[in-house]
Structures are given as C-alpha cells and as structure tokens.
Image (spheres, grey):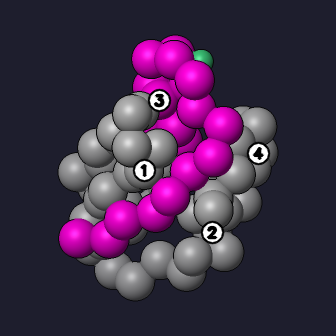
Amino acid sequence: MATVKINGMRCPHCSSAVTKALENIDGIGNVKVDLEQGEATYTETHPVPLAAIKEAISKIGFEVA
Ligand SMILES: [Cu+2]
C-alpha cells in the first residue's frame, strides 16, 4: 500500500477525477482518495514510478505534494 499527498482537491468531483486518473495507470489498483486528508492510497501489482503518478495527477490539474 502506498500513499501520496495531493494538493488542490476541493470537492467530490475532484477526488473522483483523481481516483479515475490513478486507476488508469497500469499497475495501480485499490485506489482510495481521502478528500479531507488530501491524500490517495493505492496498491501496485508491479512497481510504478512516482513520476508516473505525478504526471497523471498534474495532467488533470492537481499536484502531488
Ligand atoms: Cu472539485
């Protein structure tokens, strides 16, 4: 289980966009986004570089802290 802090989420729409973006990354599963804490947890079926996470998140307008 991995956790990343994500800046910029303000409402459930944001957290569901982040959830989808993470789920679309090959190797990532069990995504849970906590809007209040501003963080996402996920599991990896194979190692996924943090750079790939950051890119997917910034592409939709948020930022990995
Ligand atoms: Cu929002």
Quadrant location of residue 50? bottom right
According to the picture, the residue beneath numbered tag 1 turns out to be: 39
- Residue 26 lies left or right of residue 52; in this view the side is left
Judged from the image, the secondary structure of the residue bearing numbered disc 3 is helix
- Asked whether mark 4 and ligand 1 are closer than 8 Å, the reply comes as no
The N terminus, quarter of image: bottom left
Q: CA distance from mark 1 to mark 4?
A: 17 Å
According to the picture, the residue beneath numbered tag 2 turns out to be: 52
Judged from the image, the secondary structure of the residue bearing numbered disc 1 is strand
Toward the viewer: 28 or 58?
A: 58
Q: CA distance from mark 2 to mark 1?
A: 16 Å
Nearer to us of marks 2 and 3 is 3
According to the picture, the residue beneath numbered tag 3 turns out to be: 15
**Label 2 amino acid?**
Ala
Toward the viewer: 15 or 20?
A: 15
Q: What segment is highlighted magenta in the picture?
A: 1-21
Q: Is residue 39 above or below residue 42?
A: above
In the rendered structure, does residue 8 fall within the stretch colored magenta? yes
Mark 2 and mark 4 in contact (Cβ < 8 Å)? no
The C terminus, quarter of image: bottom right
Ligand 1 falls in which quarter?
Answer: top right
Mark 3 and mark 2 in contact (Cβ < 8 Å)? no
Nearer to us of marks 3 and 1 is 1
Q: CA distance from mark 3 to mark 4?
A: 14 Å
What residue lies at 51% left-to-right and 17% top-to-bottom?
11
Quadrant location of residue 27? bottom left
The disc, 2 or 3, on the residue closer to the chain's N-terminal end is 3
For disc 3, the neighbor class at 10 Å (few under 14, some 14 to 19, many from 20) is many
Labelled disc at residue 59: 4
